[in-house]
Amino acid sequence: MDKRDTILPAELVAAARKVVTANLAAGRRIALAESCTGGLVAAALTEIPGSSDMFESGFVTYSNDAKLEMLNVSADVLETFGAVSVATAWSMAQGALEASGADVAVAITGVAGPGGGTEKKPVGTVVFARAERGADPGHVVADRKDFGDLGRGGVRLQAALCALELLLPPEVEGEA
């Protein structure tokens, strides 16, 4: 790829290329529900030519109202667990799956900083979830990462890289 074709970090573009290639090969279409990454994962995927054949849609639901309205996240979930929680990320992923024709959806929600952190959820806390069409809804695939205060850009980059890893088909996950 010509360096003029991207404004994003090479590491992010390389991870996105891997996701696009693997999902095209698997015949899977994906959707995203992004909060703290603000569309960064979608931007990385769309840097890759041919991504339109596997990238269905992306929802940037930065506010709680957007999570409620666009992804059908329950107000009870948001009030009980907060926006940065496994319950909210899982609901966001399920909502993105339901609102799209995708086979798999990944959600990202977290505290990028510099403010907004708490003792239980400090800056650098990010929660991810993946939902797959036809999967057992009782089987929750979610994870919380504590990246630490890497600066806003650093947290968002690490969150985007983790989300891309979750978008890999199972047979490709974890390969370097």
Image: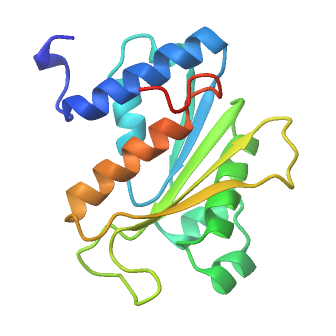
Judging depth in this view, the residue of 39 and 13 nearest the camera is 13
Instruction: Check the image and report above or below for 37 versus 11.
Output: below
Q: Is residue 170 left or right of residue 53?
A: right
Quadrant location, the N terminus: top left
Instruction: Check the image and report above or below for 32 versus 64.
Output: above
The location of residue 135, given as percent across then percent down, is: 84, 39
Quadrant location, the C terminus: top left
The location of residue 132, given as percent across then percent down, is: 74, 38
Answer yes or no: is residue 103 visible: yes
Instruction: Check the image and report above or below for 121 versus 106.
Output: below
Give residue 50's quadrant in the image: top left
The count of marks equals: 0
Residue most extreme to the bottom: 119
Instruction: Check the image and report above or below for 171 versus 128.
Output: above
Answer yes or no: is residue 39 visible: no
The residue that appears at 65% across and 14% down in the rendered structure is: 26
The residue that appears at 76% across and 44% down in the rendered structure is: 98
Q: Is residue 42 left or right of residue 10?
A: right
The residue that appears at 71% across and 76% down in the rendered structure is: 77
The location of residue 81, given as percent across then percent down, is: 64, 81
Q: Is residue 94 left or right of residue 139?
A: left
The residue that appears at 64% across and 24% down in the rendered structure is: 29
